[in-house]
Image: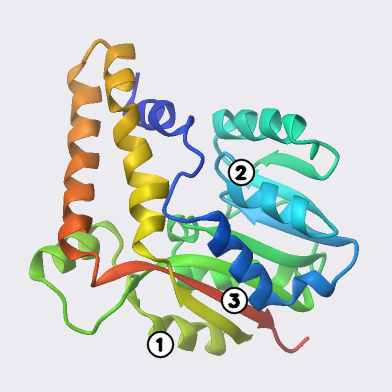
């Protein structure tokens, strides 16, 4: 089993595949103004197992196209949507976020929690803009520095893993430069990292290693996850995900 398959196996049981929370999804909905809309069409890009997609479908008068390139995650979402009575409101689509199957100006909102980094923030907001209706909402969470200065170990790690990490003001400027009007911003609290993401992963490590006979590859993945968790715990004051809500302007 290759590393991607192992990572999928570790994360597919998770409610979330990155930092986030139901309350934070709902706060972004409140900032977006979407609650006043009717018959909304929303795309959740990089949806994973669908925590945010299910909230969008449940809380809004909306149909949600939930997009991910990993069929294992989409299967988990399909099953959860049926269990929760949302099967008629969520359509899962196996697709790459850089080749989305939507018509221009067809979406009321594009949602993406902790996933746009796969394209890069700048590339993603540029590529996705054309799918939004005039005034349509873009809501994304993105790795963000909370301070101008930070420990060297943290900077070195994230500049290697994701060189587009930056402060919120720089991300907001990119939105403004690329045809969006910012509508709201907030940083995810530590509970979104620790209680909602890292602690559940740690609770799955034992079962994961047992399924894979404590192979070197599985053990290496656990070690890398533990190192990232420890790095975050030492440096939580300096980095988080920022949640950016904006509206398409022009056109």
Residue 96 at what x, y percent from top left?
A: 58, 47
The image quadrant of residue 37 is bottom right
The mark nearer the N terminus, 3 or 2, is 2
The image shows residue 250, relative to residue 115, as above or below, that is: below
Residue receiving disc 1: 169
As helix, strand or loop, the secondary structure at mark 1 comes to: helix
Q: In screen coordinates, is 68 left or right of 187?
A: right
Q: Whole-Å distance between the Cαs marked 2 and 1?
A: 29 Å
Q: Whole-Å distance between the Cαs marked 1 and 3?
A: 13 Å
Residue 79 at what x, y percent from top left?
A: 69, 28
Report the mark closest to the observer, 2 or 1: 2
Q: Which sits in the foreground, 144 or 236?
A: 236
Q: Residues within 10 Å of mark 2 (few under 14, many from 20)?
A: many
Dot 3 and dot 2 residues touching (CB under 8 Å)? no
Quadrant of the drawing holding the C terminus: bottom right
**Residue depicted at x 76% and y 30%:** 82
Q: On residue 245, which mark appears?
A: 3
**Residue depicted at x 49% and y 60%:** 116
Q: On residue 11, which mark appears?
A: none
The image shows residue 233, relative to residue 148, as above or below, that is: above
Q: Whole-Å distance between the Cαs marked 3 and 2?
A: 19 Å
């Amino acid at each position: 089993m290759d590393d991607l398959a192992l990572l999928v196996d570790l994360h597919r049981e998770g409610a979330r595949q990155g930092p986030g929370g139901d309350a934070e999804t709902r706060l972004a909905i409140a900032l977006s103004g979407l609650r006043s809309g009717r018959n909304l069409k929303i795309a959740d890009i990089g949806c994973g197992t669908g925590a945010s997609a299910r909230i969008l479908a449940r809380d809004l008068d909306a149909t949600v196209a939930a997009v991910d390139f990993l069929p294992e995650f989409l299967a988990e979402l399909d099953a959860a949507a049926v269990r929760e009575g949302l099967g008629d409101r969520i359509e899962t689509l196996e697709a790459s976020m850089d080749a989305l199957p939507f018509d221009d100006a067809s979406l009321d909102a594009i949602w993406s929690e902790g996933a746009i980094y796969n394209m890069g923030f700048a590339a993603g907001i540029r590529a996705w803009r054309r799918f939004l209706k005039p005034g349509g909402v873009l809501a994304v969470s993105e790795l963000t520095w909370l301070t101008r200065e930070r420990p060297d170990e943290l900077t070195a790690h994230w500049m290697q893993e994701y060189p587009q990490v930056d402060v919120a003001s720089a991300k907001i400027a990119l939105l403004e430069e690329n045809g969006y009007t910012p509508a709201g911003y907030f940083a995810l609290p530590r509970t979104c990292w620790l209680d909602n993401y890292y602690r559940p992963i740690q609770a799955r490590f034992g079962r994961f290693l047992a399924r894979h006979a404590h192979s070197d590859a599985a053990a290496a993945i656990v070690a890398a996850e533990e190192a990232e968790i420890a790095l975050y715990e030492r440096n939580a004051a300096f980095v988080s995900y920022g949640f950016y809500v904006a509206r398409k302007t022009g056109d």
